[in-house]
Amino acid sequence: MISLAGRDILHGWSKFTLTGLGLGLLIGVTLTMAGVYRGMVDDAQALLTNSQADLWVVQKDTQGPYAEASSIKDDVVRSVCGMPGVAVAANVTYLTMQVQLPSGIEARTMVVGIEPDRPGAPGYLVAGRQITRDHYEAVADVKTGLKLGDTVQVRRHSYQVVGLTQRMVSSGGDPMLFVPLKDAQEAQFLKDNDTVVNDRTRTAANPAFNRPGVPGLLEAVQGLQTSSHNVNATLVQLQPGWDAEAVAESLRRWKHVQVYTRADMEDILVAKLIATSAKQIGMFLAILALVSAAIVAFIIYTMTLGKIREIAVLKLIGTRNTTIASMILQQAMGLGLIGFMVGKIAATVWAPIFPKYVLLMPRDAVTGLLVTLVICALASTLAIRVALKVDPAEAIG
Amino acid sequence: MNASALLKRRLTLAAVAVALVGGMLYVSLRTGPLAPIEVTLTQPHQGTLSPSIFGIGTVEARRSWMVGPTVAGRVLRVTVDVGDYVKAGQLLAEMDPVDFGQRLLALDASLARAGSSQTAAQAQVQDARARAALADSTAQRNQRLQQQSFISPGALEASVQAQSSAQAALQAASANALAARQDLLRLKAERAALAQQRDNVRLFAPADAVVTTREFEAGSTVVAGQPVLRLIDPNSLWVKMRVDQGRSSGLATGIKASIVLRSSPQTALPGTVARVELLADSVTEERIAQVAFDAPATGVSVGEMAEVTLQLPATAPALLLPNAAIQQQQGQSGVWRIQDGKPAFAPVQLGLRSLDGQVQVLKGLTDADQVVLYSQKALSNGARVSVMQSLVKPESAR
């Protein structure tokens, strides 16, 4: 028995292949769109994973440090360390800012203040070394475009890049720049020189702080204004065997701070922070899938219409309806399969070019394959109906 | 359609299909989450570390002075300005003495008056002495006359009584003269004290120094203890250095240092740790040490920021690893050791670290072990890895 579908494809193979290619590009766009959404979620997950924390201790009644501003004193970490179940705790600051690259252009980065070898520090590098000095060294994500040995200006000081990381991004996809905590505290809370001088003059003009009978008071007040002992959050790692929620509850109750577990943080980041953008992408994805389905249906329909005379001949020579139907169905499925493979390859090829992370998940690909095949099958029913209705007399008429 | 054309088409189609399926397999297995994690490997090697301590600090003067009056007053004049070099004992500023002159004049007048009183008292002593001498001779004569019974005993008693009175008067006059002399001494001392106080309103340089601030001008009122001028000894500049407590092991006086000032980041000045403070800062978790310049520093401004690197002696040979290979898992340090081509977490005990990123491995590894240095993603036990030479493009690794 010869394959009617195979024969027909052999007959018009260039048309068939080109149609499959075009369809593939369309499916590729759809897969990429799903990848963009997954990438956004993964950015948020990467932020949490890379901080290596089990608990986030932040300012009371805030959803910090990623979704809201949070500020706690940097000695809170000591009282947190003393709580049962806490293995390691470390201060961390986050500050999204433009930094000046050596090339002169500015890059949007998230400057992270870390304590070395503690939670929050980059867990793995792709080049260079970890920070060893307490000041003026930085580890940068490769996406910033920085190279080892470069110097980068953050506020007042320049930092030397000693290490590179990969996939260390903020929830918004901005690459991270890790600097020592003390420098980050200064960068975050230090005002520019004009403001500092202005503030000093204001304080000096205030008679309450500048009393002739109390030497030294003014200097003390001015010193107080420029020092900063705040951080954005304290990251906590638990001792093995402790329940995160139980430790979080005792911290909330006795230390009067807000504490989030990994699940809470995912909820804040994924469900709240990127919710609108995710819905936006989801809408686009839905429309794209619909349009793709419609186009597949039309292509198969027109392909069948183009062969209507041949089908009439087949009917005339007594071919059974099921044979004709299976030929059309096989062609539609083949088209879908080719389209899917081309689409998957195309999406993988162009995904790294995107400015933000595009994550192509195998599960999405499998779902995409199934959906494509179902759409192709549904679309072929339309063509099959036309083919079955055709009058064999048309072959000679 | 002839058979060979059909075969050619079939072959072409088959080639396209094979290419597609091959591409598909490559794409799903070599990229995305299923792909092996690219890593680079390293081996621990025997070597010595030269650990160093890094800290930042500000330039300060070891000897500084705040020159001001000891009592409240008004500034009369300031004779030096910021940047002037002054000698020990040089007049720097003067406070308004207000009524010191008048009070000295009054004391001078009192002294003159006390001198006159002393002269008068001495004259009275002489007078009393003359009277006593007269009374003595009168009494002796009357005694002789009474022995010869020329005068009555009553007349003799009268003259003896006069003699005693005259003696008493002489004693009183002598005491008065002494009091007048002591009065004079008291007034002289008072005047000397006032003169000293008047000198105290003059502010002199306590040592050879340079003026750093001039805080008040003539006419300003200053309370006791407020400095009018601040001076520093320019040869006593040093750097007050702050070091993280966790990395301050080995900090001691006498260690050689290299100081990089913010104003000239290209040149390192030699120095020595001159003092290590016993009190550490418990809030910032830092220790404080003072590092003196080996050669007198020129063109350095006080308060300038400096980076200080202290060079500690080299350690005994031990296994060394780059710190990028060290990972933290649940608060424990370790490395990803390659066993049968798969990474496995191996806890290690670490020793000293150097600033260039080398760490001593005391326990847990041998120099035959292969450990992961860099990885593209976080590793897990038994993850699929593919070993690369470098994870970043050659032009970005310098």
Image: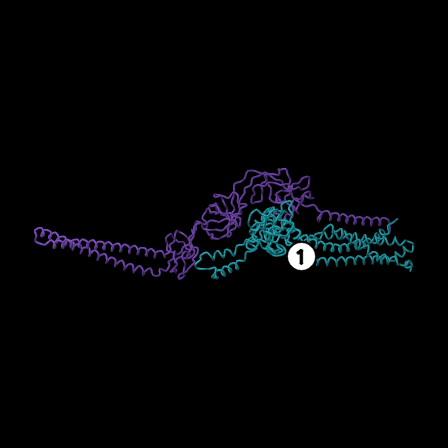
Chain colours: A cyan, B purple
Horizontal placement of B387 versus B122: left or right?
Answer: right
Of B306 and A303, which appears nearest the observer? B306
Horizontal placement of B388 versus B56: left or right?
Answer: right
Q: Which amino acid is tagged 1?
A: Lys
Of B7 and B193, which appears nearest the observer? B193
Q: Position of residue B220 (x, y in %)?
A: 41, 61
State the residue position of label 1: A272
Label 1, residues with CA under 10 Å away: few <14, some 14-19, many ≥20: few
Residue A105 visible in the snapshot? no
The residue lying at 29 percent from left, 60 percent from top is: B106
Position of the C terminus of chain A by quadrant? bottom right
Q: How many marks?
A: 1
Q: Position of residue B393 (x, y in %)?
A: 65, 48
Q: Position of residue A111 (x, y in %)?
A: 60, 53
Of B19 and A112, which appears nearest the observer? A112
The quarter holding residue B47 reads top right
Q: Secondary structure at mark 1?
A: helix
Q: Position of residue A355 (x, y in %)?
A: 67, 55
Horizontal placement of B103 versus B384: left or right?
Answer: left
Q: Report in which chain the residue with disc 1 lies.
A: A
The quarter holding residue B187 reads bottom left
Residue B302 visible in the snapshot? yes
